[in-house]
Image (tube, helix red, strand yellow):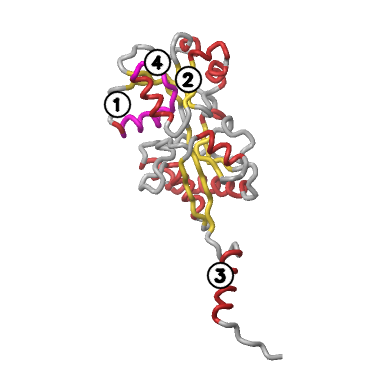
Amino acid sequence: MKVLPLRAGRRSLIVLLLFCFSPWLRAQSITLVADYWCPYNCEPGSEAPGFMIEIAEGAFAAHGVKVDYRVMPWLRALHAVQKGALDGVIGASKIEAPGFVFPAMAQGRMRNGFWVAAPNPWTYSGVESLQNVRLGVIGGYSYGEEIEAYIQDPANAAQVTVLSGEDPLLRGASMLLRNRLDVLLEDEQVMRHWMAEHNFQSRFSLAGSARNSDIFSQVYVAFSPAGEKSAIYAQWLTDYMEKARRSGELAAILQKYGISDWQ
């Protein structure tokens, strides 16, 4: 039986179909999302996208997978990843993202600080010192058992403002300056970076820090509980953290953002 040669048009169609449907030929990527939380995760596509983004890029590049990093409001990011519409969130604690798939090693450590508009003399001296101040917090963030119990207590509802949307830090800082809040609770590295970026170092001061256990302070790139490859992705990140810490690659990434290794 004679086999007729494929016409050019038909041959092109077969090549196109192979490209579209073969996972080996198709470029692989993973979509990671979070709200803007620099220096953990910063401006997408910039030379300094954030140290957790650079960690993720290093981990996935070793397996030929490109990181597609996007910024969106935090609660929306958590919801989209939880249902499997996106692959992972950046900067989540195990309290913030229950049921998500986490690497065995954290990609960062946060420490929440109480910030006031200078020269407010108020200082944090335990949860009881919050009783007579108007406190701003960001929706969906974890702050530790004691503080979260205070935030969620209906008796304190009039004293607590939950911030959300595209830029909750900017909103909270503006409310401090306009005397609509007395205290803003925000990660110390994030607030310092934000103040330096806007030349606001003289406008705000740190009035105390929240001391929390690892489950509240360690942050991760956490993956969707609905993702088929989530466990693999988490293992890749764990492997990379071990190797990068030994080789000095992790230290170099952190140094770029003025951060020391937390371990």
Separation (CA) of disc 4 from disc 2 = 11 Å
Q: Where is residue 64 in the image (x, y as percent from the top left)?
A: 51, 58
Give how far apart the Cα atoms at labels 3 and 1 are: 56 Å
Can you say whether 11 is above or below 184 in the image? below
Question: Quick check: 183 left or right of 243?
Answer: left
Distance of label 3 from label 4 (alpha carbons): 61 Å
> Where's residue 129, x and y in %?
46, 10
The stretch in magenta equals 178-197
Horizontal side of 107 relative to 85 (left or right) equals: left
Q: In which quarter of the image is the N terminus?
A: bottom right
Nearest to N terminus: mark 3 or mark 2: 3
The local crowd at label 1, few if under 14, some if 14 to 19, many if 20 or more residues have their Cα within 10 Å, is some
Label of residue 161 in the image: 2
Of pointers 4 and 1, the one earlier in the residue sequence: 4
Type of amino acid at the residue the image marks with label 4: Asp
The disc, 3 or 1, on the residue closer to the chain's N-terminal end is 3
Please tell me which residue lies in front, 31 or 50: 31
Task: Classify 38 as above or below 151.
Answer: below
| Residue 59, horizontal then vertical, whole percent | 50, 50
Discs 1/2, front: 2
How far apart marks 4 and 1 lie (CA) works out to 17 Å
The dot on residue 201 is 1
| CA separation in Å, label 1 and label 2 | 24 Å
- Left or right? Give the position of 114 relative to 7: left
Q: How crowded is mark 2: few (under 14 residues within 10 Å), some or many (20 or more)?
A: some
What secondary structure is found at the residue carrying circle 3?
A: helix
Per the rendering, the mark at residue 16 is 3
Left or right placement of residue 192 versus residue 243 in this view: left
* Residue at horizontal 53 percent and vertical 12 percent from the top: 156
Dot 2 amino acid type: Thr
Q: Mark 4 points at which residue?
A: 182
Name the quadrant containing residue 188: top left
